Amino acid sequence: MGLPTWLFYDHPEAYVRAFDVAGKKWSIVVSTAPHFFIGGNDNALWALLVGVLFSFGAAGYLQMIVTRSRRIQMLVDERTMQLRTANQDLVADIAARKHAEQELQLRDRAIEASANAIIITSAEGPDYGIEYVNPAFERITGYAEEEALGRNIDFLWQRDSEQPGIEELRACLQEQREGQAVMRNYRKDGTLLWSDMYIAPVRDDYGRVSHYVIAQYDITATKRYESELEFQTNRDSLTGLANRTLLRDRLSQAISYAYRYNHPIWVLFIDLDRFKFVNDTLGHQAGDILLKAVASRMNSVVRDTDTISRMGGDEFVVVLPERTDSGLSTSIVRRLMDAIAQPLTIEGHEFFISSSVGVSVYPADGVEPETLIKHADIAMYRAKETGRNNFQFYTSEMNERALERLRIEGDLRLAIERDEFLLYYQPQVDLVSKKIIGVEALIRWQHPELGMVPPARFISLAEETGLIVPIGNWVIREACRQSKVWQDEGFIGLRTAVNLSARQFAQQNLVQSIQDALTATSLLPASLEIELTESLVMADVEQAIGILRDMKTLGVQLSIDDFGTGYSSLSYLKRFPIDVLKIDRSFVNDITTDPDDAAIVTSIISLAHSLRLSVIAEGVETREQLDYLQQHGCDQIQGYFFSRPVTAEVMTQMLRDGTRLQLTDDQPA
Ligand SMILES: Nc1nc2c(ncn2[C@@H]2O[C@@H]3COP(=O)(O)O[C@H]4[C@@H](O)[C@H](n5cnc6c(=O)[nH]c(N)nc65)O[C@@H]4COP(=O)(O)O[C@H]3[C@H]2O)c(=O)[nH]1
């Protein structure tokens, strides 16, 4: 293959002549020798080269431009795509937000429109202040939003704080959990609002509880219906008292409680003595009036925790469970009988209705409701047999005890009038001077038949019946009178201590009556010492401090009796304006044999001294006990070792004689 013809400068067609010679074919070809186009055309060649190169460059450039623009196009497409997606996302987001907003608005409106009260409180204790209440809340409770905001929800139950639901709500707040409680709430006008309350914690974006939402359902109507229903099934329709069903239920409950806490229960079977007579002479209507009156009278004497039921006819059963704060006594039976026996006027006729009562005691007389009721019934028949208007225990032993108490109670009421009380005095001796520096006045009852009755047999009964108040006042006055006699005889500085009982301590005019006794006898106040037991002052410390301060302003001395037997907190002890601590006899008793008691006694002595109180040990019976106390710095002693309680005359003689204590290390005179 040769070079392309266009590269050759000139190339005219060759001249070709064919002919025959000698029989052979001949041809002549005449042509110009071709010469290369470039030869002698350098410039043209360069131009050609430049042109070619330029063309190549241009083509390359063009290619580059094309590639770049294609990439740009791609980028543009890509971005456009991204923007489109972002736009779509944005649209979706806006739609979602709008939806969420609409949902929120819907929820807001739903909460606002809810028929039930919704309350939102802060999760910040201790107030858990209310931040939102819906209109239903205002409607249901009667409180306007402004009156509720910022307050603790407890204003809804006001002072009715003995509700199990409160504990549950508190636990939900503390444990940050959901819960439900049926509560007695009160509307602004004070009316009862039964509420079923649901509480749930509300968490913030970080999962922390920021609020609580409470839904409050007004279930007052349901409750009313329930209680009507309950009333119909469990109550006697005439008197409203418990019927047999409820009685059995309550008695079973009382038995399981009594079993757990080892408390007794009394079951009283009461039968009205002359009911048949009223019914027969005045008719059923009068009988109904009488039964209703008896029921309401009985209700007014017992406590909320007791149950009164009507067994039908004129028979009633009362369940009296013992409570920690007060024991069971025949005075409750008497109170019930007295209430029934109040005169009653029906149709212009005045009636006196007495009753016969039988008492059975859990667990001694039975542990089943049926047995206890049956035994109380048997005892009631015995009471009727012994002459109506009477009560009998199922067991004879209980009867005897009850009889004795009854007799003592009856006689106790008359004892002051009959002047049967007297005071004995037990001397208290100083361990340094060995002289009598004080006496404790101890009451005795000179009973016309029972002889000398010690306080252990009647003080608690006097407490129960309230007779301790007049008896106690008599003691204070008599002690002051005797003390003044000794003062006048020259025994200046002699202190006379009197015991104060719990009931007296609670007496409104206690300070005044002490003041009256001091004034009436002209005794120097410092000569009178009031003894209070540890448990008495610890029952309500703040109140006790107030009363003690008032007594102290009179100028009397104050001492804490039976010290060590209660649970005195030392910080309280410091606040009591007292002068003397009395170590209880039970510690002194074993002081030489029991190292624990010995340690308690020495600690009480040093405690008393560190509080700048003087300390006296009671019940000192032996020389060993005395020696121990003296060696450990006890200030004074009282006990049989030195002297038993004695009459005022004997005491006067001892004072006149200057009777002194003999200590082991004393040199014989
Ligand atoms: N075993 C033994 N006993 C000793 C000894 N030294 C004294 N006692 C007895 O211990 C009691 C001390 O009185 P108390 O602890 O206040 O205990 C008194 C006090 O709580 C109360 N009491 C007595 N009189 C009154 C009073 O007028 N009013 C009030 N509210 N209670 C009184 O009756 C409690 C008993 O009084 P009492 O039978 O007179 O008994 C007295 C006293 O006779 C001793 O060495 N050994």
Image (tube, rainbow, N blue to C red):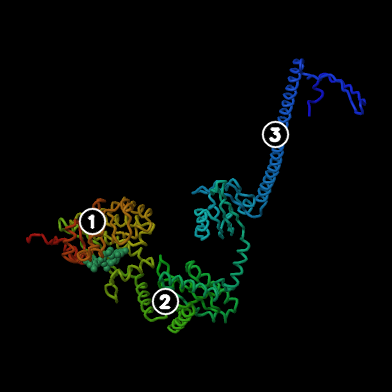
Q: Residue at x 19, y 54 (%)?
A: 492
Q: CA distance from mark 2 to mark 3?
A: 98 Å
Examine the rendered structure and indicate whether residue 83 appears above or below residue 52: below
Q: Which disc number belongs to residue 75? A: 3
The answer to whether residue 2 is left or right of residue 271 is right
Q: For the residue carrying disc 2, how many other residues have a C-alpha within 10 Å: few (<14), some (14-19), or many (20+)?
A: some
The answer to whether residue 544 is left or right of residue 89 is left
Q: Which one is closest to the eye, mark 3 or mark 1?
A: 3
Residues 654 and 669: in front is: 669
- Amino acid type of the residue that numbered disc 2 sits on in the rendered structure: Pro
Work out which residue is located at the far left of the displayed protein and give it. Answer: 669
Return the disc, 2 or 3, that comes first in the chain's sequence. 3
Marker count (numbered) = 3
Q: Residue at x 59, y 45 (%)?
A: 146
Work out which residue is located at the far front of the displayed protein and give it. Answer: 22
Q: Which disc number belongs to residue 363? A: 2
Return the disc, 3 or 1, that comes first in the chain's sequence. 3
Q: Which disc number belongs to residue 605? A: 1
Disc 1 secondary structure class: helix
Q: Residue at x 55, y 54 (%)?
A: 156
- Amino acid type of the residue that numbered disc 3 sits on in the rendered structure: Leu
Q: Position of residue 292 (x, y in %)?
A: 55, 72
Examine the rendered structure and indicate whether residue 100 appears above or below residue 595: above
Q: For the residue carrying disc 3, how many other residues have a C-alpha within 10 Å: few (<14), some (14-19), or many (20+)?
A: few
- Amino acid type of the residue that numbered disc 1 sits on in the rendered structure: Ile
Examine the rendered structure and indicate whether residue 12 appears above or below residue 298: above
Q: Which of the 4 image quarters holds residue 53?
A: top right
Disc 3 secondary structure class: helix
Return the disc, 2 or 1, that comes first in the chain's sequence. 2
